[in-house]
Image (tube, rainbow, N blue to C red):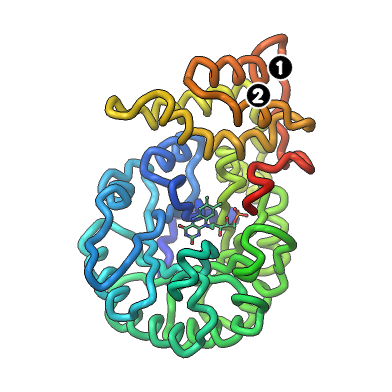
């Protein structure tokens, strides 16, 4: 079942999407990812929607400057049904593939104002928002949800609202809001949604490699795989999913390819108005995830966290990704156990 999803995907290939990630998946990052082998669908970072605000100009750039050759969905986050529907209608003036509603953000400053994952505490409001957005959005309207807030009790009501209001597709991050990004992902909830819903379902959460993604899609019957942190670490994951699902030889990046990826990120993020230290601090948002797959002791991650400027950053990169023959070593398919980008936050 493909709903209103554009059917660009080759027969037999598992469709893939880059997950929306605030302060990460901007237009520059989407461009770098597309160069490595793009996913079938992109999502913007969320547009924060209030009754009085306009659409964020920087986030709009990932729509107006989309050079990936792939469709981009615009995600919205808020708690006011009318304002969210208004924002969706405004976004339809831009070249988007559809509007996506965020029902999962676990950041306390968001859920405390009953937006993102906070909405899952009130089934009536979820139903009202989905209903209003569906009525007003002419094109594709999708939802990205978690299983619930404290537990998965709200999940069934959420599925009912998605079905009743004929949402075009649903992405499920198989965790509760309280789990944040930790702990097991419940893939059986996705299989259940596939059984109950008329629309396609995307699986999301800890699809750490092409092998894991393809096996979860085959086991759950989901339409496609949405990848977040795994794609920051391994930007080749989308081409690998395509190759794996088509039975082709799967690309195996070496550490020198990772060095090249970091160079491209650095160039894509270059802004003459922004100082070196600030850019390097921003790049660390990506480098810490890359570090999960460089060496099993986490030495690269340890050193990269401490760099302060570009020269130092590339010295650490060269030491771990190029020098003494390490450039020829294969980059790990999976993150190394215990080497975690954000041990204190997630
Ligand atoms: C840094 C970061 C920012 C995120 N921002 C968003 C967001 O703007 N909208 C959203 O729906 N989910 C957001 N997420 C959640 C991801 O889209 C995804 O659901 C989650 O990371 C699980 O997938 P993964 O295990 O493949 O990373 C964010 C996650 C991270 C790590």
Q: Quadrant of residue 293?
A: top right
Q: Is residue 54 above or below residue 297?
A: below
Counting from the top left corner in percent of width and height, residue 91 is at: 26, 63
Q: Residue at x 27, y 55 (%)?
A: 56
Q: Looking at the picture, does residue 103 appear above or below residue 31?
A: below
Residue drawn at point x = 51 percent, y = 24 percent: 308
Label 1 or label 2, whichever comes before in sequence order = 2
Q: Secondary structure at mark 2?
A: helix
Q: Looking at the image, how many numbered discs can be counted on the residues?
A: 2
**How many residues crowd mark 1 within 10 Å: few (<14), some (14–19), many (20+)?**
some
Is residue 162 depicted above or below 101 in this figure? Answer: below
Instruction: Give the x, y percent position of residue 246.
Output: 63, 48
Image x and y of residue 278, in percent: 41, 30
Q: Nearer the viewer, residue 276 or 339?
A: 276
Q: CA distance from mark 1 to mark 2?
A: 7 Å
Quickly name the residue at label 2.
255
- Name the image quarter holding the C terminus: bottom right
Residue at 40% from the left image edge and 81% from the top image edge: 130
Which residue appears at 38% of the width and 76% of the height?
A: 79
Element class at badge 1: helix
**Quarter of the image holding residue 52?**
bottom left
Residue neighbourhood size for the residue with mark 2, other residues' Cα within 10 Å, grouped as few (<14), some (14–19), many (≥20): many
Asked whether, in this view, residue 69 is left or right of residue 246, the answer is: left
- Near-viewer residue (345 or 215): 345
Per the image, the residue denoted by label 1 is: 326
Mark 1–mark 2 CB contact (< 8 Å): yes
On the question of residue 177 being in view, the answer is: yes
């Amino acid at each position: 079942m493909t709903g209103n999803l554009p059917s660009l995907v080759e027969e037999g290939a598992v469709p893939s999407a880059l997950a929306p990630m605030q302060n990460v998946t901007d237009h520059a990052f989407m461009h770098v990812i597309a160069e490595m082998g793009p996913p079938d669908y992109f999502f913007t970072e969320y547009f924060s929607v209030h009754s009085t605000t306009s659409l964020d100009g920087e986030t709009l750039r990932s729509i107006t400057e989309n050079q990936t050759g792939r469709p981009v969905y615009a995600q919205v986050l808020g708690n006011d049904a009318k304002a969210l529907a208004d924002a969706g209608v405004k976004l339809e003036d831009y070249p988007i593939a559809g509007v996506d509603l965020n029902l999962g953000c676990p950041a306390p400053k968001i859920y405390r104002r009953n937006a993102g994952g906070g909405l899952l505490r009130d089934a009536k409001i979820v139903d009202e928002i989905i209903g209003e957005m569906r009525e007003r959005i002419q094109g594709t309207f999708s939802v990205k949800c978690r299983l619930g807030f404290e537990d998965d009790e709200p999940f069934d009501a959420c599925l009912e609202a998605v079905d009743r209001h004929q949402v075009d597709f649903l992405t499920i991050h198989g965790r509760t809001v309280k789990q944040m990004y930790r702990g097991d992902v419940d893939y059986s909830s996705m299989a259940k949604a596939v059984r109950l819903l008329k629309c396609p379902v995307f699986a999301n959460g800890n699809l750490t490699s092409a092998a894991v993604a393809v096996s979860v899609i085959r086991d759950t019957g989901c339409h496609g795989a949405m990848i977040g942190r795994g794609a920051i670490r391994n930007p080749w994951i989308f081409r690998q999913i395509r190759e794996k699902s088509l039975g082709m030889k799967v690309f195996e990046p070496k550490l020198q390819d990772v060095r090249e990826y970091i160079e491209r990120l650095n160039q894509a993020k270059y802004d003459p108005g922004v100082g070196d230290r600030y850019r390097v601090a921003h790049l660390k948002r990506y480098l810490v995830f890359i570090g999960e797959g460089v060496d099993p002791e986490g030495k690269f991650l340890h050193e990269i966290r401490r760099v302060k400027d570009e020269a130092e950053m590339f010295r650490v990169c060269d030491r771990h990704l190029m020098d003494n023959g390490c450039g020829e070593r294969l980059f790990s398919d999976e993150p190394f156990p215990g080497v975690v980008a954000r041990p204190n936050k997630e």
